[in-house]
Amino acid sequence: MTLKQLRAFLAVAQTLSFVQACERVHLSQPALSLAIKALEASLGGALFVRSSRSVQLTPEGEVLLSLAPRLIADWDDARERMRRHFALDIGRVELAVIPSFACNLLPRALGRFVERHPRIDVAIHDVINERVLDMVRGGQVELGIAFEPTQLERLDFQAFHTDRFVAVVPPDSALASRTRIGWETLLRERFIALQRPSAVRALLEQTLAERRVELRVAFECHQLATVGRMVAQGLGVSAVPGFCVPQMAELGARCRPLVSPGVQRRIGLLRRTDRQLSSAAQALCDLLLRIEDWESEPTEAGDGLVLPDAP
């Protein structure tokens, strides 16, 4: 049973005239008759009683007449809805994002996305790095934003930013007057770190272990906001991804370039290798992959990623 056959049936059933039905659906009478015969053959019986003077519905034809308008309307609605999805008039994207990116650079990216596609909904799961990978692999989300994994395993990774970690120090500390801070100097202070299994914590420990240096932690917490507030209150120092600079500044802490050794890692988009993205997800993906073109642009909130040289 095709849509063309249904429309032909409905035209005949409503007019009880093949001549009038031909005009309504813009078919020749042979083509219309062929469509009706094909429909009857597919359903297994007659839908009309035809004579030289009249056309009448059979009982089965009456049943189909009660169903056909809804079937056609549902088809038209489905077609229009799919057209709007492809045109990015409507849609929904689910993505998993590491918290350090979700609460810093992501809102600005989503602001640009919403300006272009205001009717597309976005669901954000801000979870730890390993959970981002798991959610993308498991199909719970279409896209992930995370640090580059050491093993992809059915995932495709597209880097859009290389993040350089910064030192975070109290505003009244002597370290705040420096233009850059080395690890040897930073680790003389009490260190505040994210709790394991944080990817940020793991990267710092790995980098220092390669230099045979132990990361001695005085305070541990789960959220970067807590780290920033504790540093601002003078409880210690820390090291965070560079895109957290605006967040740390809002919390009252100061950020300076971190050297000897510098810590950096690529961040990017993760997707399943065996699945095609929806039109909405692809549009968001395309925007994020151009992040280098706009991430350092100044805004009213001053949320660029350029590190200040002075407090």
Image (cartoon, rainbow, N blue to C red):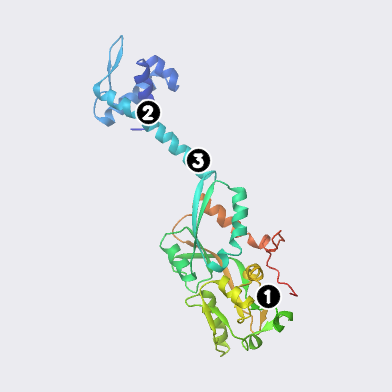
Reading the image, the residue beneath label 3 is 83
Reading the image, the residue beneath label 2 is 69
Task: Identify which residue is drawn at 54% across, 43% down.
Answer: 89
Q: Is residue 38 visible?
A: no
Quarter of the image for the C terminus: give it. Answer: bottom right
Q: Nearer the viewer, mark 1 or mark 2?
A: 1
Which element carries disc 1, helix, strand or loop?
strand
Reading the image, the residue beneath label 1 is 254
Tell me which corner region of the image, top left, top right, bottom left or bottom right, holds residue 293: bottom right
| Crowd around label 1: few <14 · some 14–19 · many ≥20 (10 Å) | many
Q: In the rendered structure, which amino acid carries the disc numbered 2?
A: Pro
Q: Are marks 3 and 2 in contact (CB under 8 Å)?
A: no
Give the number of the disc on residue 8: none
Quarter of the image for the N terminus: give it. Answer: top left
Task: Identify which residue is drawn at 51% across, 73% down.
Answer: 222
How far apart in space, not on screen, are marks 3 and 1 (Cα)?
49 Å
